[in-house]
Amino acid sequence: MAQALITLPKQIRAGQRVTVQAMVAHPMETGQRADAQGQLVPKDIVRRLTVHLDQALIFEVEFHAAVAANPYVAFDLRAQTSGRLRLKWEGDRGFSHVEEVALQVT
Amino acid sequence: MTAMGAAGASGLWVVRSWASSGPFNLAGTATPALQEALKHFAAGAAMQRGRLKIDIDALVENGNAVPVAVTYTGPQVEGVYVRALGLFTELNPAPDVAVFRWPAPAAGLQMPARVSTRMRLATSQGITAAALLSDGSCWFDRVEVLVTLAACIEES
């Protein structure tokens, strides 16, 4: 199971613009690197991050090999009501990780 | 440090080509792979230079994880939003870095659209960012980055 980290303000005022930071543990193997035996390490990267606020898809990211290991993304959102923020990372070799956080709007 | 000091003294590495008048142009100096990637991103829209701010260190010591932020700085027009922001390189093995998409303005995010991530830089090169707007226009800009220790060379 992969590990992921999401940070956002604990309490948000309705309509306030907040920044969400998200990171997932993943080596992001580029497919360009050789191991100690000189063999190319096969490409193995996170391909996609989708962000849902409750049912609605609000943001998505398409990653390529040039994104650093443990892909990090910061994006902004503005919420009017409390809800659940659901982040899903998908990648090569069936990589999939879902992380949910509560969005507390006051 | 000596090399850095020398470069610093001559002011070479502080050059950032945010201005719209740089020598770089899409038809000429951009690498074919970058042109192809930008064409794919723009999906047929004509690309104009400007309206983007790329925040990245002009001098990078380690190319393995370089913080970069892209902001669309164009005027806020009622009903127009940024559909996508893209980040591209010229001299990495592949031009694409990441594409960020907002499916609808109701996404909660309106102008100015802003994202950040951490990228790999294989060598000193230009970084190009592009924005695709819901009114069909497409904008790009480019900055130069000097890398002293490249990504992708370390052995495990």
Image (cartoon, coloured by chain):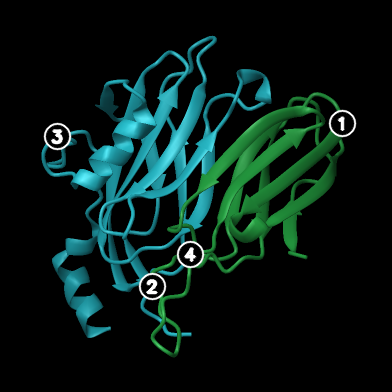
Chain colours: A green, B cyan
Mark sitting earlier along the chain (2/3)? 3
* Marks 4, 2 in one chain: no
Q: Position of residue B80 (x, y in %)?
A: 50, 14
Residue underneath mark 1 = A82
Q: Position of residue B75 (x, y in %)?
A: 43, 19
Give the mark toward the camera: 4 or 3.
4
Give the mark toward the camera: 4 or 2.
4
Q: Dot 3, crowdedness within 10 Å: few (<14), some or many (≥20)?
A: few
Mark 4–mark 1 Cα distance, whole angstroms, equals 39 Å
Residue underneath mark 2 = B152
Residue underneath mark 4 = A43
Mark sitting earlier along the chain (4/1)? 4
Verify CB contact (< 8 Å) between mark 4 and mark 1: no
Who is closer to the viewer here, B28 or B117?
A: B28
Mark 2–mark 3 Cα distance, whole angstroms, equals 29 Å
Q: Dot 1, crowdedness within 10 Å: few (<14), some or many (≥20)?
A: some
Tell me: B110 left or right of B94.
right
Query: Residue shown at 40%/16% (left/top)?
Result: B136
Q: Chain of mark 1?
A: A
* Marks 4, 3 in one chain: no
Verify CB contact (< 8 Å) between mark 2 and mark 1: no
As displayed, is residue A63 above or below residue B39? below
Residue underneath mark 3 = B27
Query: Residue shown at 57%/69% (left/top)?
Result: A27
Give the mark toward the camera: 1 or 3.
3
Query: Residue shown at 67%/19% (left/top)?
Result: B106
Q: Position of residue B93 (x, y in %)?
A: 31, 60
